[in-house]
Image (tube, rainbow, N blue to C red):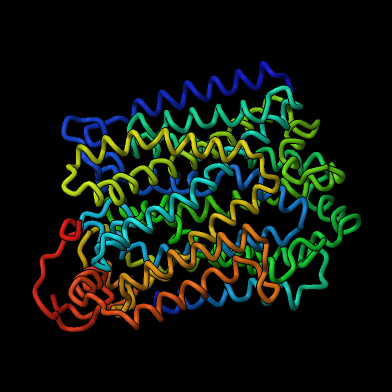
Amino acid sequence: MSARRWIWGVWILVLSCYVVPYGLLGGVEAWYGSFLFWCVVGVLVIIANIMITRTFKTGSSQDNVSQAEFPVGKEE
Amino acid sequence: MAIGLIWGAVLVYLIVGLGVAFLSRGKATNGAGVDMSGYFLGNRQMNGFVSALSYSATTYSAFMMVGLAGLTYAGGVGAFGFEIVYFAGVSLVAIFGPKFWAVGKRFGYVTPSEMLGHRYADRKVAIVTAIASCLFLIPYAAVQLAGVGYLLAGMSGGAISFTTGVVVSTVLAILFSYIAGIRSVMWTDSLQALFMIVASTLVALLVVHSLGGFAELFDTLATEHPASLSVPGPGLFSFTTFLGLTIPWFFFSLSNPQVSQRLFMPASLKSMRQMLIGFLIFGFIYTVVSVLWGFSALVAFPDLAKSDLATPTLLASEHVPPLLGVVVMVGILAAAVSTIDSIMLTLSSMLSRDVYANVATGASEAKQLKVGKWVLPVIAILAFLFAELQLNLIAVLSVAASTGLVVIVPAIIGAFYWKRGTAAGVLASTIVGGLVVIYLYLTGIKPLGLPAGIWALPISVLLFVVVSLLTRPNHESASEFMRTAGTDRSPRIADSTASAADVQ
């Protein structure tokens, strides 16, 4: 899965942080409700960031920056 | 808790911290040819591990263990959700980090305001965004100072006054930032971050165990405080309040210069990745620990007069051995100081680089650095005076500061992705947007029933876009900047060797 898709995954997770606890889990007054949900979101955010940044290399060339997520032509 | 034990622990912390600060001195920050980049950015050579710990210590402060625990105590699990949305927002570093880093290296930026001034080809942009940052970050620093005041007063049963706690943390912050600039800040931060995470996690486990374990804790919450496990919960986290709190904090990693300036510092992209992932792991643990503290305090002491006293009361209680309690107390003190010194250092770099150097045209690097060092204690004193006002719910005040800073976000995103953005658009969105936020907080007015935190971003976006479309952009500086950042696909318009110095 490309970094771009993982970034979209993060945005969906953020949206779910509002929709799920205030909607689906609004009446669940237990640890397995909103508390567990936000815990899972936190872990998924870490995984997503690991995947988004996996192309960050040691080198400091401009290509690294471009390829990290927003590929551009190498007109320079 | 015994006063002698508290003061003894603070003294040990002071000695170790000063030792680390002095050891961190190097050629880049204290040598003969030290310059702005050396003192404030560590010559852009910071490694990933130290950067991760320092980023964590700078971000997570008295707000977490005093404010977030208090917010959990008062409002239940919604406080956790609020922090998780912020946490997800740090993913912006994965997107914008390499771009900040690339343009910083290419054009020699020292501050985010300098970057905006060059990108929009107008020094007024640098001046205004720097001043706006000061206007909102000094209260934010004051929030941290107040956190220490509450902590020491709460743990000593009032024997150590609020003012004494504020004075102690102000002096420590001045020393840690002055000794070797960003190097002493980052190395003391790193030590403090390790200390904070280990000690606070131990205490959380101990307290939860003392209350009967995780199952018992959550069973008790479900039985005696069921509303605390859902949103809107006891009432603090209505959906609009939640939105108003989370929107500004989601953009924290971009809007707050004390953390966005860190994107200029890593030695490589690999170091930046280590910084980001290390921070996220640290942050997740720290967030869960802070929330557990709040829940534990709610179970153990359900009738506290002020929610901000949840953490100090818990630490001073029989659930925590005195020695461990005082260790964590120093950890929280360290957390506050590590945030304040970073803010002070960043603000002093902005005032000298973006305000002084633009007003006093031709000021040398050495002169800028000298001014920056003089400004450091002045900022500290201002924060001290603000803290002395003893505003009540420190978490809410902290968010007010973030709401103010969010008005700069359209200019930052536009710098990288919207070539049509103009300096006039930035000035309008920052000045008018900032004034609107101040007005809403001062008057308490909520247009359409929505808090300032919800209004700040759309207002500033609208102003930025409309005013930009009505004015002429500088295509050349925009192209050069965006090409360096890797966000401009269009063919080169004209060869340019523009640099940050060209607009200053």
Q: Residue furthest right?
A: B223
Q: Quadrant of the C terminus of chain B?
A: bottom left
Residue lying furthest left in this view?
B495
Residue B503 on image: x %, y %: 19, 60
Task: Say whether residue B240 is visible.
Answer: yes
In this rendering, position of residue B332 left or right of residue A21:
left
Q: Residue at x 36, y 49 (%)?
A: B48
Q: How many numbered marks appear?
A: 0
Q: Residue at x 46, y 27 (%)?
A: B17
Residue positioned 34% across, 33% down in the render: B374
Does residue B136 appear left or right of residue B443 in this picture? Answer: left
In-image side of B132 versus B404 (left or right):
left
- Foreground residue among B357 and A65: B357
Which residue occupies the extreme top position in the image? B4
Find residue B185 and report its horizontal and vertical position in percent.
Answer: 40, 37
Q: Is residue B259 above or below residue B25?
A: below
Corner quadrant of residue B478: bottom left
Residue A25 spot, x, y in % from top left = 76, 73
Residue B55 or residue B122, whichever sits in front: B122
The answer to whether residue B270 is visible is no
Residue B83: percent from left, percent from top: 61, 59
Image quadrant holding the N terminus of chain B, namely top right
Query: In the image, what residue occupies the spot 78% across and 44% down?
Result: B306
- The quadrant holding residue B442 is bottom right
The quarter holding residue B85 reads bottom right
